[in-house]
Amino acid sequence: MNFKRIFVLAITCGLVMGIFAVSFGAEKPVYKDGIDAAFPPFSYIDKNGNPTGFDVEVINWIGKEMGFDVKIVPVDWDAIIPTLKIGNIDLITSGMTINSEREKQVDFTNPYWKINLAVVVREVADKDGNLVPQYNIFSAVTAGKTIGVQRGTTSQTWLQENLIDKGVDIKLKLYDNFLLAIEDLMIGRIDAALIDGPTAQTAIADRNAKIVGTIDTGEIYGYAVRKGDTKLLNLLNEGLKRLQASPEWDRLVNKWLIGG
Ligand code: ARG
């Protein structure tokens, strides 16, 4: 090999490395974010087909702040943790309650919201023709009643562990998303539905349905990443911290969780 060839080779290598450096430097990482697309006000698809909601706006803000792009991927709720574990998504931002069962499988960010479970019943006409809730919390959540919940949620485990396992003869009807439960409730196929409070609020807003009580589970929501993905976890926690210290946090809370 003569000097000229070595020189040309060196220049070529240098160029190739330079091109890689430039393109790597310019490109932001893209994280695939799994959501249940039917969980307003936290994550859902709007009329125009765009993902939106509190969690979606939060993650987009954090991505911008911390220098990564977010690709929202709708996933069935009861498959969302397995989908994260096999690597088809990188995080979950969808009103997920932090609990010990899930902590064995995923890592959670710091908590960002707290909820209780709401008991929703439909309204029916009383003898004067006024719309009133069909049951109160006692007559709704009791033996002989059928209660609808989303499959794989804390609503399901709460009813199972606190009532059914203790011998209360309540029937559980499981749905792929909470909206299907509400639809069944409105046509009288189930007696009540048990749903995260903020989501229940959005559901009753345009329906003849009422929240007749809450079960004070005091659940806290967090965002989930794969176990051991400390890089993304740190980005999310730092982003959350910055967001919560900025006026944008109050704006989002008022827009989605309190004002709405
Ligand atoms: N917070 C409850 C849970 O973690 C219900 C969550 C349902 N979220 C959803 N995106 N469908 O089990």
Image (cartoon, helix red, strand yellow):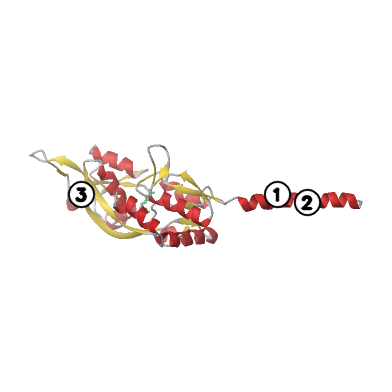
Report the mark closest to the observer, 2 or 3. 2
Three-letter residue code for mark 3: Ala
Q: Residues within 10 Å of mark 1 (few under 14, many from 20)?
A: few
Looking at the image, residue 211 sits to the left or right of residue 55; the answer is left
Between label 1 and label 3, give the one nearer the viewer: 1
Identified by mark 1, the residue type is: Ile
- x, y percent for residue 101: 41, 59
**Which disc number belongs to residue 140?**
3
Residue beneath disc 2: 13
Q: Position of residue 42 (x, y in %)?
A: 37, 49
Element under disc 3: helix
Vertical comparison of 44 with 226: above or below = above
Q: What amino acid is labelled 2 in the image? A: Cys
Residue 19 is tagged as 1
The earlier-in-sequence mark between 2 and 3 is 2
Marks 1 and 3, how far apart at CA: 66 Å
Distance from Cα at disc 2 to Cα at disc 3 = 73 Å
Whether the residue carrying mark 2 lies under 8 Å from ligand 1 is answered with no
